[in-house]
Image (cartoon, rainbow, N blue to C red):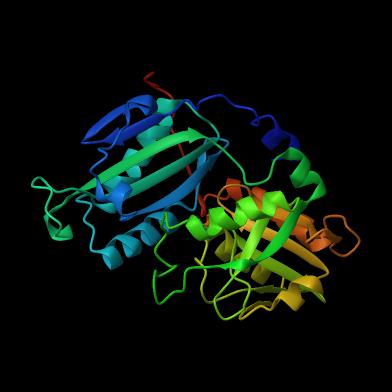
Amino acid sequence: MSVQDIGRLDGLAYPRGAAYMNGQFIALSEARISVLDWGLLHSDVTYDTVHVWNGRFFRLDSHIARFRRSLEKLRLRVDLTDDALRDILVECVRRSGLRNAYVEMLCTRGVSPTFSRDPRDAVNQFVAFAVPYGSVANERQLREGMHLHVIDDVRRIPPASVDPQIKNYHWLDLVTALLKGYDAGAETVVIKTTDDAIAEGPGFNVFVVKGGQLFTPEAGVLHGITRQTVFDLAARRDMAVRAARMSEQQLRDADEIFITSTAGGVMPVTRLNGAPVGDGQPGPVTRGLFDAYWQAHDDPAWSLAVDYDDQVCG
Ligand SMILES: *Cc1c(COP(=O)(O)O)cnc(C)c1O
């Protein structure tokens, strides 16, 4: 994949796509939940997102496994085997016809038939959908690097309150920080934990390259599948990775910074709070990992082809 490929996806109108809920495949525009769903009223929901690139899912098994762990922790039930769940996601993509897609599976606490205040009375609701692929970074940002700000006065929800390993929609900290960042000229932001360590940004993990080694926060962040993929790619190149507490000073002293997400892969950061990172260009380690990341999408061990042959429209 090249930077230009992602750029062509910019500027889409309301996304086309396909969805699955209540046992049926439907058009994305028909996929709706009740305003009485605990998922909406209490953010009582978990989800996972995987992408399809050039007609192939990337590390789908890892995403399904993480979704299962999140469901278990929240005591949510999806009565589907992993095979059935995988087949539903594949079918959403097949019906959408999308070769590059962002595919989400989610489960809300649901609606209680009696509107009781006991979460155990609610009927859990599973929804899956496929929409056109979207990236945290646009084409220019992938080429030139993003402008990242560390926001100090909004802190990540502590793990003792909401377990960050449960992929969740508790994003008021992240969105509040993002709006403050935009006011200050940032393109995206990273926030800290309540004990002053670097945490993560809106839907992405952060890495520092220093002296040829990789560093990334360990606690108070979601352990991203893209983060894990960077660990795996680094191991193949004999590059050391340290997942440990990261200070703001480490970010400031970085040779290179990049961020990682299913929505965009490995994305360079070339400005931190307005100041250039290194020489202000995406660095060689970041560029090497970017290329290796997209090359890995053809590896049969890490990807699953969608069979679009007898495509149904709608
Ligand atoms: C999804 C997400 C990430 C990135 O995880 P990936 O599995 O790499 O997409 C990082 N932080 C948060 C808060 C997220 O929701």
Location of residue 235 with respect to 114 vertically, above or below = below
Residue in view at x 47 percent, y 25 percent: 16
Percent position (x, y) of residue 197?
Answer: 62, 77
- Give the answer, above or below, for where 162 lies relative to 112: below
Q: How many marks?
A: 0
What is the quadrant of the N terminus in the image?
A: top right
> Which of the pair 291/126 is nearer the observer?
126
Quarter of the image with the C terminus in it: top left
Residue 87 relative to residue 137: left or right: left
Question: x%, y% of residue 127?
Answer: 31, 41
* In this rendering, position of residue 114 left or right of residue 270: left
Residue at 73% across / 69% down in the picture?
208
Compared to 237, does 36 lie above or below? above
Task: Answer whether residue 251 is visible to the viewer in this image.
Answer: yes
Please tell me which residue lies in front, 233 or 63: 63
Q: Quadrant of residue 167?
A: bottom left
Q: Residue at x 82, y 77 (%)?
A: 211
In-front residue for pair 212/55:
212
User: Closest to the observer: 288 or 164?
Assistant: 164
Q: Quadrant of residue 256?
A: bottom right
Residue 148 rendering spot, x and y as whole percentages: 73, 57
Task: State the residue lying farthest toward the right.
Answer: 279
Would residue 65 be found to the left or right of residue 137 on screen? Answer: left
Residue at 32% x, 47% y: name it.
40
Q: Residue furthest top?
A: 313
Q: In the rendered image, is residue 203 in sight? A: no
Residue 4 at x, y = what percent? 74, 34
